Image (cartoon, rainbow, N blue to C red):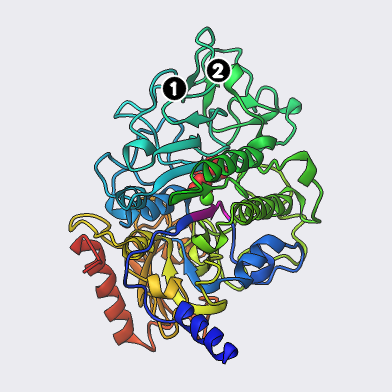
């Protein structure tokens, strides 16, 4: 009898769709440049990620979990807005002085959850621009920014850490800025004697391999130039600790009311400079050590949820912003020390590519006591956060916003028989005409330009007209090596039309 009622409770907990509004805390952890095969629960054997593995063991581990682009800014744009980045302006990789890319008034996952009574925070990498049309006023108020699109608070790395400047942004300000030493950020060398990665290359603690040879800070030369703001600068080694410290503070402060924390890690993006205590932890060099550092962060967040007795009141989502890359501009020997490690798992391609490796990444959901542990093949994407979390919390989407976000809540919750998306557009960067469309087991590539950043295709495009298409069957050919357009002309044409329609109709959410 006892056993029966226990089972009945369990099945009540685990079964059925999520129809009535609930307000669990939501912790969305987004890793940077983390590939499908970079963590042990997705098959990595050369390093170990016990905390991420535990999250997966206690929740749903998706084998078709995606981000919508294979670079950072467009994935983050579409995760927050629920709209494909190719529909927006300036949604490619943002430069150091980029103005805010998401305009105030845009519905975002943060504004939706704020509407449901949540306290909302983004802590970590932003890389979606700050300030009005002239860009960030580094010494003044940095707005618009996250606070103008639904976040109550933020503690940010403003761009990406291989770009200047190395200062934090707390809400609207750079903390610890000395007015006597203003911060200047620009594209041009500020004075002939300004030390750079070119003039002072022999002083660097990590050499660059391409780009990344402008202003030097902490022995590392960066993209772009800056001067001043000395008292406000951080050490690369301390970033992960800072994200954890600020996140723990935020969760403690809000433990008695629903909160949404977007934990936006910079691991494992370049320059990969993990804290000294993680350096040398793997055989894979600093890239592997940064994965271990990321795993430590996940562990600290989970420990905090346990300590605050919130694990059963919190939905945790773990994902990445794009697939992996080895040499992304610094000589950190990621490729040389790779050994048997395959960061993209079984997939071809990685960061910058529309092959599966560019966007199919680790994706895990956990809500202790509510989500039944499982492995799911359903297709879900970071772009679906808006519609799915709106459904969870009883919010409605605006007609003219979140244009490509689908409600896949039941799939995210591992509900038996729930289905995810049947299709997804993948893009590489901004709106530059490199596309893919996955529809069920089929995958179409479309290259509108002969200069596509894909050497294999570039060679093939040399004497052909564009757009150029390729069709792959992911079931028979998961590595996308055999173009099967000729054998499947109807499917090829159907997917070409579907992709064109999604692009031209301006929305894919019905
Ligand atoms: C590229 C950078 C690369 C990385 C990327 C953005 C060069 C040569 N390459 O332009 O290092 O910063 O932009 O990465 O400068 S992302 O993950 O933030 O999209
Ligand atoms: Ca990235």
Residue 100 colored in magenta in the image: no
Range drawn in magenta:
27-33
Tell me: residue 35, above or below residue 278. below
Tell me: residue 461, above or below residue 495. above
- Return the mark for residue 138: 1
Q: Quadrant of residue 346?
A: bottom right
| Image spot of residue 118 (x, y percent) | 38, 49
Left or right, 428 with respect to 286, comes to left
Left or right, 3 with respect to 425, comes to right
Q: Residues within 10 Å of mark 1 (few under 14, many from 20)?
A: many
Q: Secondary structure at mark 2?
A: loop
Residue at which label 2 appears:
229
User: What's the CA distance linking mark 2 and mark 1?
Assistant: 9 Å
Residue furthest to the top? 180
| Image spot of residue 220 (x, y percent) | 67, 31
Q: Are marks 2 and 1 in contact (CB under 8 Å)?
A: yes
- Return the mark for residue 349: none
Question: Which of 183/219 is in front?
Answer: 183
């Amino acid at each position: 009898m006892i056993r029966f009622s226990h089972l009945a409770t369990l099945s009540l907990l685990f079964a059925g769709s999520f129809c009535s509004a609930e307000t669990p805390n939501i912790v969305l952890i987004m890793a940077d440049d983390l590939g499908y095969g970079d963590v042990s629960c997705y098959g990595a054997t050369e390093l170990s990620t016990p905390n991420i593995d535990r999250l997966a063991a206690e929740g749903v581990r998706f084998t078709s979990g995606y981000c919508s682009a294979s670079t950072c800014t467009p994935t983050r744009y579409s995760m927050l807005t629920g709209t494909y980045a190719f529909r927006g302006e300036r949604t490619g990789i943002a430069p150091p002085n980029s103005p805010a890319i998401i305009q105030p008034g845009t519905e975002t996952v943060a504004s939706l959850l704020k509407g449901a009574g949540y306290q909302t925070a983004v802590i970590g990498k932003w890389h979606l621009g700050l300030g009005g049309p002239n860009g960030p006023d580094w010494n003044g108020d940095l707005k618009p920014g996250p606070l103008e699109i639904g976040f109550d608070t933020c503690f940010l790395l403003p761009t990406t850490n291989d770009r200047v400047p190395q200062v934090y942004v707390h809400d609207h300000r750079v903390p610890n800025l000395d007015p006597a030493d203003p911060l200047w950020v620009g594209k041009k060398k500020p004075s002939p004697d300004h030390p750079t990665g070119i003039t002072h290359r022999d002083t660097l603690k990590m050499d660059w391999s391409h780009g990344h040879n402008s202003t030097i800070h902490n022995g590392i030369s960066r993209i772009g130039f800056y001067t001043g703001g000395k008292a406000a600068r951080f050490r690369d080694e301390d970033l992960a600790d800072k994200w954890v410290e600020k996140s723990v503070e935020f969760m403690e402060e809000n433990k008695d009311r629903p909160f949404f924390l977007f934990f936006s890690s910079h691991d494992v993006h370049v320059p990969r400079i993990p804290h000294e205590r993680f350096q040398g932890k793997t055989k894979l060099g600093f890239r592997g050590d940064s994965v271990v550092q990321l795993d430590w962060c996940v562990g600290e967040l989970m420990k905090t949820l346990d300590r605050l007795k919130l694990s059963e009141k919190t939905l945790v989502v773990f994902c990445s912003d794009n697939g992996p890359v080895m040499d992304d501009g610094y000589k950190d020997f990621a490729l040389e020390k790779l050994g048997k490690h395959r960061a993209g798992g079984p997939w071809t391609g990685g960061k910058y590519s529309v092959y599966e490796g560019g966007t199919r990444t680790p994706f895990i959901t956990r809500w202790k006591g509510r989500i039944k542990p499982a492995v799911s093949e359903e297709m879900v994407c970071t772009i679906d956060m808006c519609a799915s979390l709106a459904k969870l919390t009883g919010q409605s989407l605006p007609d003219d916003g979140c244009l490509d976000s689908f409600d896949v809540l039941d799939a995210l919750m591992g509900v038996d028989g729930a289905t995810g998306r049947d299709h997804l557009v993948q893009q590489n960067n901004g709106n530059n005409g490199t596309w893919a469309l996955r529809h069920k087991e089929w995958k179409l590539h479309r290259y509108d330009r002969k200069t596509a950043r894909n050497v294999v295709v570039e060679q093939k495009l040399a004497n052909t007209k564009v757009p150029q298409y390729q069709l792959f069957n992911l079931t028979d050919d998961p590595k996308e090596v055999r173009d099967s357009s000729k054998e499947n002309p109807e499917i090829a044409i159907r997917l070409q039309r579907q992709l064109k329609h999604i692009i031209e109709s301006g929305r894919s959410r019905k």
